[in-house]
Image (tube, rainbow, N blue to C red):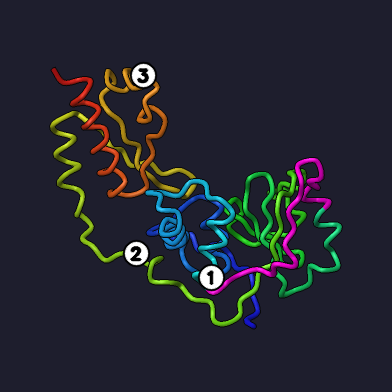
Amino acid sequence: MTRLKIKPVNNTLSDRNRYCGPAVISSLTGMTTGEAARLIRSVTGQRKVTGVHTHHLIRALDFCGISFFPERCLRFLPQNKPTLAKWLKNSKESRSTGRVFLVVAGHHFQLVEGRRYVCGRTLDIVSIKDKSVKRRCRVEEVYELKAEGKIIIPDRAKKPKRKYDQHRPFVQKMKQKYGFMAEWKQEGGYGDYWVEMPSHAEDLAYDMEHELSDEHTCYDMADVAGRMERMAEFMEEYCVE
């Protein structure tokens, strides 16, 4: 059995995702959060990763050679959920070095090894008593993780080799034809595209409670192209006479 060890999240600028599911996979395997997000997408079939169900995360970890001890899995009823602080206190004896726990608490995935903690908020390994650890949140599930053999980065996680400008001609065409906007924004080390239609179309989508009114963030040029394709369909149906 391979000894698991948590590591700082690999959140490289060129291939990243900001959410906690990919951060957990990154910490355990060393892959980038972007690779971890692609792995999760291969499991869920979703176009992008924002939130992820526990069973999808477990399935993604399984592709890396990481599973959990079924007999050490804890699932708490709503009325019996302990705080993270209480679970840490009660599990003090079992949280020895080399034993890694996936903790689902406060709708957030985090990893605990001994007194060491890491998640998508901290990125680096911190103490379980660090102020960034949300100790008052309620614990929903706990899994002790294991690896029978070598931990791997599956091919499905790796960034596909394609030309950087594969989607740019289409995006440029949509900008010129409909007046769409795609603006790159970076804040706190994270970057993404903010994509929107002309203001009259945005107002109409909002009044209609259309799905395009809710989410404007895209994480790469493929996401931008996909959103603009849906925006073009909206414009043709509701805004072009």
Q: Quadrant of residue 44?
A: bottom left
Mark 3 = which residue? 208
User: Is residue 221 or residue 228 the one in the foreground?
Assistant: 228
- Mark 1: give few (<14), some (14-19) or many (20+) Cα within 10 Å: many
Residue lying at 33% horizontally and 22% vertically, measured from the top left: 205
Residue lying at 25% horizontally and 24% vertically, measured from the top left: 198
Q: Amino acid at mark 1?
A: Thr
Coordinates of residue 221 in the picture (x, y in percent): 28, 48
229 relative to 11 in the view: left or right: left
- Could you say whether the residue bearing mark 2 is in a helix, strand or loop? loop
User: Is residue 201 or residue 236 the one in the foreground?
Assistant: 236
- Could you say whether the residue bearing mark 1 is in a helix, strand or loop? helix
Coordinates of residue 90 in the picture (x, y in percent): 86, 58
Whether 100 is drawn above or below 218: the answer is below
Q: Amino acid at mark 2?
A: Lys
**Closer to the eye: label 2 or 3:** 3
37 relative to 68 in the view: left or right: left
Q: Quadrant of the C terminus?
A: top left
Mark 1 = which residue? 29
- Could you say whether the residue bearing mark 3 is in a helix, strand or loop? helix
User: Label 2, label 3: how many angstroms apart (C-alpha)?
Assistant: 37 Å
Magenta extent? 65-86
Q: Earlier in the sequence, mark 2 or mark 1?
A: 1
Q: Quadrant of residue 177?
A: top left
Q: Quadrant of the N terminus?
A: bottom right
Coordinates of residue 88 in the picture (x, y in percent): 80, 57
Q: Which mark is residue 143?
A: none
Q: Which mark is residue 159?
A: 2
User: Label 2, label 1: how many angstroms apart (C-alpha)?
Assistant: 16 Å
Residue lying at 41% horizontally and 44% vertically, measured from the top left: 186
User: Is residue 105 or residue 165 the one in the foreground?
Assistant: 105
Q: Is residue 83 magenta?
A: yes
